[in-house]
Image: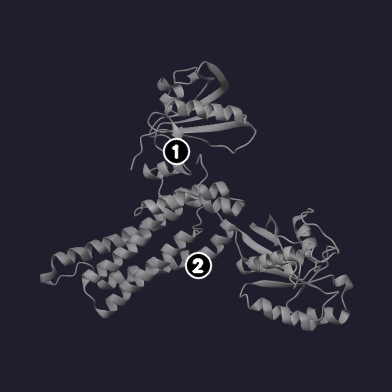
Amino acid sequence: MIQHDTIVALATAQGISAIAVIRLSGKDSIAVTQRVFKGKNLLEANTHTVHFGTLHHQGKLIDEVLVTVFKEPHSFTRENSVEISCHGSPVIIKEIVKALLTEGARLAGPGEFTKRAFLNGRMDLAQAEAVADLINAETDNARQAALNQMRGGFSKEINHLREELIHFASLIELELDFGEEDVEFAKRDDLRKLILTIQSYLSSLIQSFDQGNVIKNGVPTVIAGKPNAGKSTLLNLLLNEEKAIVSEIAGTTRDVIEDEIVLGGINFRFIDTAGLRETQDVIEAIGVERTRDRMRKASVILYLFDLSATNLTDIQRETEELKQLAIPFIRIGNKIDKANPELLNALSQEDFVLISASQKENIQHLKDKLLSFFQVSTVKSGDVLVTSLRHYQNLLQTHQSLDRVLAGMSEGITGDFLAMDIRQSLHYLGEITGAITTDDLLENIFSKFCIGK
């Protein structure tokens, strides 16, 4: 699967910047760069050295640049690689890439540099996925979790489990070669103890996914309620900026408005929505339907009640409707400065957060309540967390396959069927690290990477 052509892509963000970095990788990447570079002979340069010079193409000076040379196998991709640091003008970038394409390179696909690093044995598949997670990390916890995985902590544990299972699988396979002699190389009691130990560790990894998923992907949090309940005011208050238009006119918010902030090391994506009510306005009706759709997809709902314009009966009815969604929610009583004292007294006996968004009262209490739904401890170096849905599914399937092995031993099934279930467990574990993979799986993973990584 080793590829010999040379790929090129912009590695830094699109747009105007002080500098930009253009990457090349492939057997001829240094030679391709040398054809447009005037300065030191890059083909004679040592690996991991930086050289100042100019880039020229078809007799035209393009830019003054710094060229960094990495010679195989001492590079990210384990191929000859070059990084060109140029001025960050989109025109300059375009001209350099065009010149390199003319000299024999081709444009890289999404994630192709990291894919080559995987194919060339620089890292396994779980580590390769962590590269994308590290780039996209928006909190320190997400950064540390991705860094731990990229450095191989998760892969090391998975590989250790596979080695233990492979040992027993090979012994059972050996038994099959001596089927007529009724020998038992793999002690069944030892195999049972090993599987129970492995399942215990798998269970801890599976349970870590709830925390890992929150750390990696954040928490979509929908702010919902009837018109004029104070949803937009609350959004602006949480974000500490005037993100949404605030008006006394009902139905001001007609489309979804969202933004992100970090609370307690967790990235919350707050989504302000159109007020829930029956309406003849076609545009507002579309907004209401989008609100209901976002509520169904949310991880948690902040549901606001306007305490100056509601009663206990309506609150109880809307609460029952919320329960039907089967999604965690926080009931928020807003405008406590205008509320009936009897209603306030009744709600204080229930699980309610009572605030005044306009007066900025009890907002910290609301934040604390929200964080209580997602207990996330600080991720430390070396911590192993499952952050990928793909890994989570593979771990579940491994656990289930090992259940079948235990059940088979209890029922006294023959070694060939035991070996089959163990091989299935090894298959699921192998898919995590890429020891077992398919072209479709690789395409699905690396297509989500940015071009240039």
Q: Residue furthest left?
A: 180
* Residue 448 drawn above or below residue 345: above
Q: Position of residue 272 (x, y in %)?
A: 72, 62
**Figure label count:** 2
| Residue at position x 54%, y 65% in the image | 210
What residue did someone put label 1 on? Answer: 76
Residue count near mark 1 (Cα–Cα under 10 Å), binned few <14, some 14–19, many ≥20: some
| Residue at position x 41%, y 46% in the image | 123
Q: CA distance from mark 2 to mark 1?
A: 33 Å
Is residue 225 toward the left or the right of residue 92 in the image?
A: right
Q: Position of residue 374 (x, y in %)?
A: 62, 66
**Looking at numbered disc 1 in the image, what kind of residue is underneath it?**
Phe
**Looking at numbered disc 2 in the image, what kind of residue is underneath it?**
Gln
| Residue at position x 41%, y 41% in the image | 116
The quarter holding residue 122 reads: top left
- Is residue 139 among the parts visible in the rendering? yes
Q: Nearer the viewer, residue 78 or 164?
A: 78
The quarter holding residue 267 reads: bottom right
Q: Secondary structure at mark 2?
A: helix
Which callout, 2 or 1, points to the residue nearer the camera?
1
- Is residue 373 among the parts visible in the rendering? no
What residue did someone put label 2 on? Answer: 207
> By what rule are the colours in the image chosen?
one colour
Q: What is the number of the mark on residue 121?
A: none
* Residue 358 drawn above or below residue 345: above
Q: Position of residue 106 (x, y in %)?
A: 44, 33
